[in-house]
Image: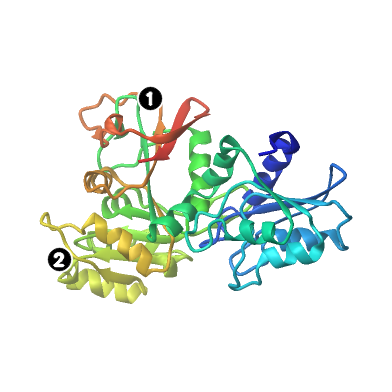
Amino acid sequence: MQAPALRKDLVGRTIELARNGWGKTHPNPMVGALIVEDGEVVAEGWHERAGGLHAEIVALKNLGRQPHEGAELYVSLEPCSSTGRTPPCTVAILEAGIRKVVVGAIDPDPRHSGKGLEWLRKKGIEVLVVPPEWEELSNRLNFIFNHFVVGGHPLVALKMATSANGMVAERAGFPSRVTGEDARADVMRWRSLFPSICVGSGTVIADDPSLTARLPDQEWCPVRIVVDSSLDSLSASFAPRRVYTDEYSDRTVVLTNQRGMNNSEGLSIAENLGIRVMELPGGQDGRVRPSSIRQAVADLGLCATYCEGGPALARSMLDEGEVDYLFSYVSPKVFNSSEALHGPDLSKLSLHKPIEVGLGEDLLRHGYL
């Protein structure tokens, strides 16, 4: 490996470009690319959306001419070598006259992994893969894609916000501000990455959340999944909750089991509101099986879900080993009231490759389970 010939700043730039596709490329990965001539970046590009042009092609188009002799291509992920909704990028690279390609990460998809690099090398193009510590940066960006293509099933992430003493609310059944503004803004950023968000019926009843990603420049709504074994959140006892009546209500899906399907009132209200209800197998406790949630996400054609609990749903998913990735926000606040609501004990969980981020007075720790 010719490590001295690689420039970490250019590798980092490809990752910055890739992030422009944040949440818009599913089930494809986020990818960034740039063309370098005589040590200077002359064109950049990124994959904007699924079905759109790949990053390498965008960079070549943005250049608007044939690359100069000796031009290099830096790309955050191995160029594709097969024809899908777009032609293979390897052919475009060869036809453009690029003679050196620097790759931030090898495609984890077992159907394609390494084949693009092998094809380019056979065509006489120099191919360099960055060192493992740099490669991890590219891999981590696409942790949803990587899990989906390697495991063959959607990634389930769990987000929990707890006080310093492990509480998720000052008073059970009522909404609480556990974390500060910085942490809440960060949650919105992660919501905007995932194609779906999942909560239990208790959260819908107690908090009446909108479950949208409210960003500085826009509001975006993922598919909203409500796990409700009894259809209690659709009861006439409550005013219709926002997820069932707002402008994004057609993006709300309720997961229930036989118990919920026997709730004629709840089914009637769902039908009148135009809310989709999916019946899933129930467990011995009468609740929707956590393993069925992952399958439902797959049946909806989605590659991942961001589960925000509450605590009952979180405990069941953790107990059944149905969480792949954890986002744990911890506040310095202490909730000592006898009415405070305990969250699941996250201290027993060991995260693989954890990342810690300070967000105002709060701390986010996230990683693979």
Expressed as whole percent of the image width and height from the top left, the position of residue 175 reads 34, 42
Can residue 196 be seen by looking at this rendering?
A: no
Q: Secondary structure at mark 2?
A: helix
In the picture provided, is 301 more to the left or to the right than 2?
Answer: left
| Residue 167 position by quadrant | top left
Q: Mark number for residue 259?
A: 2
Expressed as whole percent of the image width and height from the top left, the position of residue 47 reads 65, 59
What scheme was used to colour the molecule? Answer: rainbow
Q: Nearer the viewer, residue 41 or 243?
A: 41
Q: Mark number for residue 333?
A: 1
Expressed as whole percent of the image width and height from the top left, the position of residue 182 reads 53, 34
| Residue 266 position by quadrant | bottom left
Q: Nearer the N terminus, badge 1 or badge 2?
A: 2
Q: Secondary structure at mark 1?
A: loop
Expressed as whole percent of the image width and height from the top left, the position of residue 214 reads 54, 50
Structural distance between the alpha carbons of marks 1 and 2: 38 Å
| Residue 81 position by quadrant | bottom right
Q: Amino acid at mark 2?
A: Arg
- Residue at 55% across, 55% down: 107
Q: Amino acid at mark 1?
A: Lys
Q: Nearer the viewer, residue 155 or 76?
A: 76
